[in-house]
């Protein structure tokens, strides 16, 4: 075994050394062999060291390649994720820019803000005023069901204390002075600007007793950012456009200037939008996460609050511009519509007279009196039914009409038996034009065939209170269409139907009295 070991370890070295000895023929063979073997060992060690270094280098290059592959994969995944996020944001931006139904996109906006801020919940609220004059924030869309339909109660106008929650300061403006420099003269001047808070932030909601929690309070922060824009879709949203600028006088034209090319001048607009400020908030919290939002997350929310505000204003203006054309068309046809209505009323009067004549002599005066009122109500409904297209056209308008018209349409819904919640914002207890106009359908015309026996005296009094003081001939509609003969016909139907309800109740009393008298008479005759 020892010989084998020596052969495997020393053998190659001795073989190489003896071969070199034979070739070189040194004087001192022993010294030569010793020197050679030392050199041999060093050479082998160097060779082994080189191989080890090459192996290490190869391993290092392999590890670097693997690490780079992982980084490249992460970069590809990150780029793909970013592309998905960018497309999501781009698609939503495009949808906001193109849509005229911004409310249908509220859910996507709050979901996007939640995704990018890692918030526990995100919710969109609208500042409104109740019929009692109390401000409130209505939550219209939320990533959490617990917030949908909730409100933050404010205070009546003029009061400052007692509002729920910490969000209200976002609606309070302040005056700040700002120095401006005239670009031509370089002179400085001071101007006063109205500014609003950029956000409301609560670092830890658990430590702030003013915070209104709609769930179990947990560690986390709260931020609200404003969504504020100019709204033109309201009952006073139309006015006459200002006159166009005066043309340049001939003496103001430079005689040496080259002749100007003829300019195609469009007809100036007849009407201009009247804006009021509409205020919303986007609120988001980290409840349960125990952290504050960083500036980047806040900035993202503010960016999309601005996008939502811009899109809302632009969408309303699109609807407003389209509506002007519709209203001018309606106004242009109003004279013919009024003439047609007058003809229809004349026909109905003749029809009532014919029906009264057909009652015959067997009908007593009380029955005739009731039937005449009933025929008038039926005739009024027939007139309205003939105006179906006009009723549907009013239901297609985005700019709310004047309050008197809204009262008339509200009374129609009440008398036709439409549930209050179908046309009323139940959070403010005010009639909502968006809900009310949705009721102006063929289905409403069918419901207007009212059975007078089904309308209680209390309901009739409530309806009378809504339309009290309104004149069928002069109900204001809006700035373009001063009055609508269709709305006048609807009010006429309300009055005629209410009269029918009252006359029916009185007639029923007389019928019952007549029955009682007949029974009494029959009893008296039997006693004789």
Image (spheres, rainbow, N blue to C red):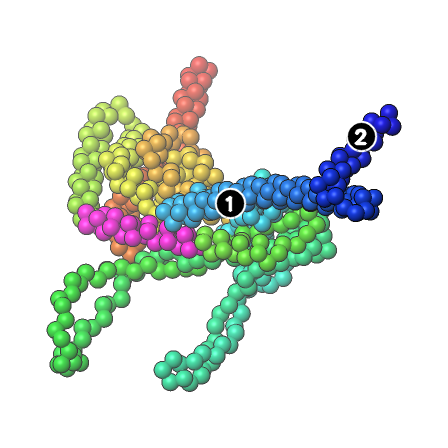
In reply to whether residue 300 is colored magenta, the answer given is no
Residue 65 appearing in the image: yes
The residue tagged with tag 1: helix, strand or loop? helix
Main secondary structure type of the part rendered in magenta: helix
Specify the quadrant of the image occupied by residue 492.
top left
Q: Identify whether 115 is placed above or below 349.
A: below
Specify the quadrant of the image occupied by residue 210.
bottom right
Camera-side residue of 139 and 90: 90
Structural distance between the alpha carbons of marks 2 and 1: 62 Å
**Residue 500 position in % (x across, y down):** 34, 35
Query: Which label was assigned to residue 218?
Result: none
Q: Identify whether 390 is placed above or below 375.
A: below
- At a point 79% along the width and 47% down the height, the residue shown is 27
**Residue 457 position in % (x across, y down):** 45, 37
**Residue 526 position in % (x across, y down):** 44, 14
Residue 432 appearing in the image: no
Labels 2 and 1: the sequence-earlier one = 2
In what quadrant of the picture does the C terminus appear? top left
Give the side of residue 6 with respect to residue 447, left or right: right
Q: What stretch is highlighted in magenta?
A: 309-333
Query: Which label was assigned to residue 79?
Result: 1
In reply to whether residue 323 is colored magenta, the answer given is yes
Query: Which label was assigned to residue 7?
Result: 2
The residue tagged with tag 2: helix, strand or loop? helix
């Amino acid at each position: 075994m020892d010989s084998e070991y020596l052969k495997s370890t020393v053998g190659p070295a001795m073989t190489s050394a003896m071969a070199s000895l034979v070739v070189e023929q040194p004087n001192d063979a022993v010294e030569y062999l010793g020197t050679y073997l030392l050199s041999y060992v060093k050479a082998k060690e160097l060779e082994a060291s080189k191989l080890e270094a090459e192996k290490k280098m190869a391993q290092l290059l392999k590890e670097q390649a693997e690490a780079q592959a992982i980084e490249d994969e992460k970069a590809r995944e990150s780029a793909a994720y970013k592309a998905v996020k960018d497309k999501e944001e781009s698609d939503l931006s495009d949808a906001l820019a193109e849509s005229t139904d911004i409310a249908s996109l509220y859910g996507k906006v709050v979901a996007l803000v939640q995704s990018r801020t890692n918030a526990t919940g995100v919710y969109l609220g609208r500042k409104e005023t109740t019929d009692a004059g109390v401000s409130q924030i209505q939550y219209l869309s939320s990533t959490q069901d617990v917030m949908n339909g909730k409100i933050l109660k404010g205070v009546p106008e003029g009061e400052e204390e007692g509002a729920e929650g910490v969000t209200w300061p976002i609606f309070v403006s302040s005056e700040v002075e700002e120095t401006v420099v005239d670009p031509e003269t370089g002179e400085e001047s001071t101007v006063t600007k109205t500014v609003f808070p950029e956000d409301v932030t609560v670092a830890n909601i658990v430590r702030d007793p003013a915070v209104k929690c709609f769930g179990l309070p947990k560690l986390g922060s709260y931020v609200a950012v404003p969504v504020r824009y100019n709204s033109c879709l309201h009952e006073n949203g139309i006015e006459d456009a200002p006159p166009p600028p005066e043309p340049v006088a001939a003496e103001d034209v430079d005689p040496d200037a080259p002749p100007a090319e003829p300019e195609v001048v469009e007809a100036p607009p007849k009407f201009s939008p009247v804006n009021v400020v509409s205020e919303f908030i986007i609120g988001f919290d980290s409840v349960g996460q125990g952290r504050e939002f960083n500036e980047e997350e806040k900035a993202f929310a503010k960016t999309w609050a601005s996008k939502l505000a811009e899109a809302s204003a632009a969408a309303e203006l699109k609807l407003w511009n389209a509506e002007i054309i519709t209203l001018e068309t309606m106004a242009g046809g109003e004279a013919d519509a009024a003439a047609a209505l007058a003809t229809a009323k004349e026909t109905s009067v003749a029809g009532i007279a014919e029906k009264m004549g057909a009652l015959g002599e067997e009908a007593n005066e009380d029955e005739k009196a009731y039937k005449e009122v009933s025929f008038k109500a039926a005739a009024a409904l027939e007139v309205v039914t003939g105006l179906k297209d006009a009723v549907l056209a009013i239901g297609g308008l985005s700019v709310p009409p004047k309050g008197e018209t809204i009262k008339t349409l509200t009374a129609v819904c009440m008398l036709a038996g439409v549930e209050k919640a179908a046309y009323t914002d139940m959070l403010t207890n005010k009639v909502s034009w968006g809900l009310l106009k949705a009721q102006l359908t063929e289905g409403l015309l069918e419901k207007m065939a009212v059975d007078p026996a089904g309308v209680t005296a209390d309901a009739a009094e409530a309806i009378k209170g809504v339309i009290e003081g309104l004149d069928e001939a002069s109900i204001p509609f809006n700035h373009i269409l001063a009055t609508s003969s269709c709305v006048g016909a609807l009010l006429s139907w309300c009055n005629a139907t209410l009269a029918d309800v009252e006359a029916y109740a009185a007639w029923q009393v007389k019928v019952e009295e007549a029955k009682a008298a007949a029974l009494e008479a029959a009893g008296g005759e039997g006693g004789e």
